[in-house]
Amino acid sequence: MALWFDESRLDDEAVLTGFDEVLRDLAESGARVRREASDVAAAMQEAVAAGRGAQRPRAVIAAGPDSRLLRAVLEPQCPVPFVAWPGPALPGWAGSLDLVVMLAPGGSDTGSASAVAEGVRRGCQVVVACPPASLVADHAAGRDSTILPATTRDQLATAVVMLDYLHRVGLGPEADADEVAQALDDVAISCSPHRDIAVNPAKILAIGLADATPIVWGGSVLAARAARRVAEAIRGASGRTALAGDAEHLLPVIEAARQHDVFDDPFAEGGGELRPVLVVLDDGAEEPVVREQRGRLLAAASAKGVRVQTVTAETGSDVGRYASLMLQGRYAASYLTVALVEN
């Protein structure tokens, strides 16, 4: 059965009501960041007091599946060596001189539980953001362990809490929960289902993705992380292929695209293949390497007639811009699901 993109559904109140749960979850992203920061306040004060009294660690090890987000924020500014270790263990050299931090918003991942238990066994200082009554919390119990109680099960909200802790103990840049929450609220307003398609950036992006295979690229480390999350959201929401990666990995895909045929109907049964569309996540990074890679991608897209869609977030903190880019992409993925129907 072929799928048809019906953009009229994006402004149809009756249709959008059927997706209220998904869209409401996106709209409440900022509220979850604020709630997480508020709920953890008392435990945060105790953890910071203990952390400031301890000797500065030899290294910081971010363990668990969400470690790469912490690395993207912390690696450029952490005053001690920083390592992301996403597997179910720790590097062989980790020991009592090191700090292990982990995001476990769900608290039920067995690999995370294994890694944090290993940190406790080796005598590392361990700080985990997770639900207090969870598998990970149980394995984190120890003399040098601290639990930052997570209540929302939201990955970004939990990350902001951990980043705030690391800033307060002198190991990372400032992460203002209110600023991140406001960035998310601004996206929720601009991408609201109640905003007309003509002025709604997420609906416009969804239309741009309707007849194409998204290739998502972000130049900075955080924008690249957001690109991967956006591609995951598109795949999960629509079941379609969506790619994210470094410029050198995406360039061959663009260069291999055949020239556009105006007579192709990608929605017709047996119709033309979906051509790539380049989605650029622009967080305002202007480092020479970012400009060079963006230029190569845009030149390749122009040469092959590949459309380019740009998502911007150029103000606020690094984490705030990351949050904005990611949420805009998630809204677009949801609107793609709303408008794709069986023909």
Image (cartoon, rainbow, N blue to C red):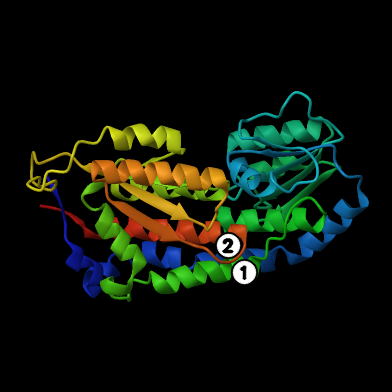
| Horizontal and vertical percent position of residue 80 | 80, 41
Looking at marks 1 and 2 on the same chain, the residue that comes earlier in the sequence is marked by 1
Which quarter of the picture shows residue 275?
top left
Residue 153 visible in the current orientation: no
Give the label on residue 330, or none. Answer: none
Which quarter of the picture shows residue 317?
bottom right
| Closer-to-camera residue (231/14) | 231
Crowdedness of circle 1 by 10 Å Cα count: few (<14), some, many (20+)? some
| Closer-to-camera residue (45/227) | 227
Q: Which residue is mark 2?
A: 320
Tell me the element at label 1: helix
Residue 109 visible in the current orientation: yes
Residue at position x 45%, y 61% from top?
Answer: 312
| Horizontal and vertical percent position of residue 11 | 24, 72
| Horizontal and vertical percent position of residue 212 | 24, 47
Amino acid under disc 2: Gly
Give the label on residue 179, or none. Answer: 1
Residue at position x 59%, y 46% from top?
Answer: 69
Residue at position x 77%, y 38% from top?
Answer: 81
Q: Is residue 173 left or right of residue 214?
A: right
Amino acid under disc 1: Glu
Is residue 201 shown above or below 251?
A: below
- The reply to whether discs 1 and 2 touch (Cβ–Cβ < 8 Å) is yes
| Horizontal and vertical percent position of residue 320 | 58, 62
Q: CA distance from mark 1 to mark 2?
A: 7 Å
